[in-house]
Image: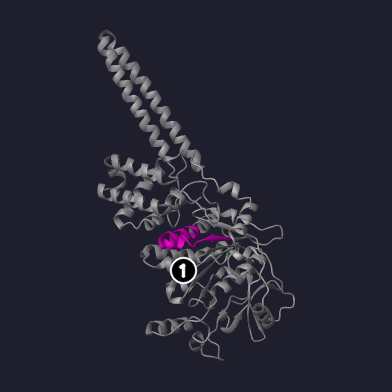
Amino acid sequence: MLKDGKLWIAKSGDTRIFMEPRMCNRHGMIAGASGTGKTITLKVMAESFSELGVTVFLADIKGDLAGMCRAGQHSENMEKRIARFDIPDWRYRVFPTRFWDIYGEAGHPVRTTVSEMGPELLARLMDLTDVQTDVLNIVFHIADDQELLLTDIKDLRAMLRYVSENRAEYVAQYGNMSAQSLGGIQRALLVLEDAGGDLFFGEPAIDIFDWMKTDENGRGYINILHSVKLVQNQTLYATFMLFLMSELFERLPEAGDPEKPKIVFFFDEAHLLFNGAPKVLLQKVEQVVKLIRSKGVGIYFISQSPSDIPDAVLAQLSNRVQHALRAYTPAEQKAVRTAAQTFRPNPNFKTEDVITELGVGEALVSFLDAEGRPGVVERAFILPPQSLMGTITEEQRHAVMEKSELGAKYDQQIDRESAYEHFKALHEEEVKQAAEEKEAAKEREAAKQEKTKKTNATKKKTTSKTGKALSKATSSAMNTIGREVGKKIVRGLFGSIKW
């Protein structure tokens, strides 16, 4: 809820607790045990950002965030909560919402191309070894240097087959690639395809600028990624969310210190991003979190405990809401102490003790003030959301999707010419050339006196046709990626294409 141009999130006694719009791109964290109110805090923040005119992207892990497209329903419990906050102008509201789903079942399909994701994130998605990851990087280098777009899985499979059959020609320039490593990548590709990769990789690829829009009233759209099914494949979920972060980082221009964020990105089940991630990837995540603030992006991690997040990342999360934690085991007690130490102390209570005493909807809150200083931690109640608490019917979901103009752009998958078609054209030309050479041999046998003349004519004709086929296939691939012929592909921090 907005009050005096600020985001009103909670109330402690008679004190209202606000988030300063200029400080919202300093990132944040919502932590707490299951059932303590993290989802309500997320909803209140998302609604407030939307009202401020800021775009929101969030993952709906449990399917209970879709209610933002419907006005809340009055009840006795809600009446008590509203009275606690003394909100005279309270009203239930609908917020501009768009639904997305990698599987295309509960939202507009979200896709990207293999080339755009890049080898490093793809390697993690496929659970490749270090050696296999190095080989995959070489395959991408070859594709980039030959200006071949890898749109979907069949493109990557065709590229791997081509490199496997011709790897001896590339060893001197790119390095060794064993048949075992290439075979291992191809097997991992089959697993990825079975896990939904055939739906995720393709065109039209998502354009993040389609998310960064406001409605006719100037409110930012809340983009909800339906993730109930997606999160069951934890690696795919974490890698996809990381890819979206990298897209924002690579594509958005520097914004300096804006009055409000361009987009706020909520990363639920944040521990999945860091669990089992290689050290080099974690370092890049830390780097993105540090630098993306200047692009006008706020990232908010949601997890059960601050200990789920590496210290280097945790240090960048300045706006914090800590719901109750349990402390039954020594490990849980240590997590409580760690969480308490992340707050600026309040002389009126001991933070470590309060964390285990908080009720549902109650939290320890500390936001940056207008000067960028961490506020003293306050024990506060989170405001109730104005939109519907809970999920919606399939009819209501589809009604929202049908009103979205983005359905015409993303709902139908397309398959344009790319690497697969390029190699298919080469193969067809080789077959044709072989047939022509066989026919020429018969002609030479029948008319030996014209051997030299007809052989030269056949070679000239074959060379001309081969050149045309290569030119046409390369041109098609270049048109698909939308670049001028001869412009080298540049890859960013995570290996994704840097536009």
Residue 494 locus on image (x, y percent): 43, 57
Residue 316 locus on image (x, y percent): 50, 72
Q: Is residue 50 above or below residue 334?
A: above
**Observer-nearest of 434 and 88:** 88
Instruction: For the N terminus, give its image quadrant.
Output: bottom right
Colouring rule applied to residues = one colour
| Residue at the far top in the pictured view | 449
Check residue 117 for magenta coloring: no
| Residue at the far bottom in the pictured view | 348
Q: Residue at x 74, y 75 (%)?
A: 89
Q: Residue at x 39, y 35 (%)?
A: 424
Q: Secondary structure at mark 1?
A: loop
Residue 381 is drawn in which quadrant?
bottom right
Res. 319 in view: no
Residue extent of the magenta highlight: 223-245
Number of residues whose C-alpha sits closer than 10 Å to that of mark 1, classed few (under 14), some (14–19) or many (20 or more): many
Residue 101 locus on image (x, y percent): 52, 56
Most prominent secondary structure in the magenta stretch?
A: helix
| Residue at the far right in the pictured view | 88
Residue bearing the label numbered 1? 270
